[in-house]
Image (cartoon, helix red, strand yellow):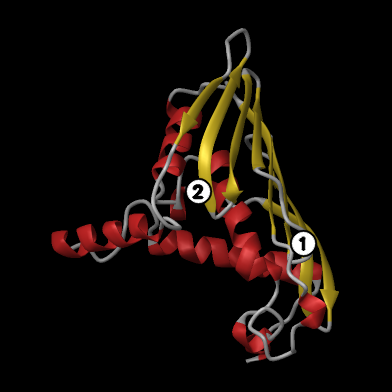
Amino acid sequence: RFFPLVLELQRLLHKEKVIGDISRMFCDFGLDINVDSLPSTHRLKNLELGGGALLDLGVYPLMFSSVVLDEHVGSKASDPEVTSSLLVVDGVDFDDVIVLKYPETRRMAILTASMRGKSGQNFLRVEGTGGTIVVSGGAASVPERIAISAKGKEEKVLDFEHEGMGFHFEADAVAADILAGRKENEIMPVAESVRMIRIMDEIRKVGGVVYSQDNM
């Protein structure tokens, strides 16, 4: 959420409305991991360590859906209706398909995550009444480029190069809040973290993934 690309994407969609009224979006995050060869103790397959595609990969498409389909965060944001289908092996989700519906704004998201197949460069597509936006990069966790295709206009491409994986953007935001004496961040308040967890819990409930903490 702290990447300059993500902040600019929000501005383009919700302030400038470069593709008009948003109708739907598609986002995928897949990695080609030989999960069958991993021991059950590996963090990706151990439920006690939060194993599975949802917590490791699916949270990125979920973040993009929140950024794209609702300009608000936390208590001001709307909770979508959730449908999910998860491929569960020995209790662990290997592949996820998630559909989010916002009835009031008539917006939908189709989100996918997989530990068994690498997603392509163009991992996010947003459609609106005035065109489309495609976000690309090495993965949903490392976005690098925004391509705007507005109706009647030439395609416009914005590049966002940065060093490393981009974790420094979040670290800088935390440091700035600490220096200013703030206890939470405006871009990602505690209420938004709780909201995302609540949505993921609903995805797991529908999809059939259970953690030991659920029974406490």
Q: Give residue 48's position: percent from left, percent from top.
A: 64, 88
Quarter occupied by residue 20:
top right
Nearer-N-terminus badge (2/1): 2
The percent coordinates of residue 15 (x first, y second) are 43, 27
**According to the image, label 1 marks what residue?**
96
Residue annotated with mark 2: 77
Q: Indicate the amino acid at tag 2.
A: Ala
List x then y, in percent, for residue 13: 51, 30
In the rendered image, the residue lying farthest to the front is 163
Q: Nearer the viewer, mark 2 or mark 1?
A: 1
Q: Nearer the viewer, residue 102 or 135?
A: 135
- Between the C-alphas of marks 2 and 1, the distance is 24 Å
Q: Position of residue 216 (x, y in %)?
A: 62, 92
Q: Residue at x 44, y 23 (%)?
A: 16
| Tags 2 and 1 touching, CB below 8 Å | no
Residue beneath the point at 23% across and 62% down: 175
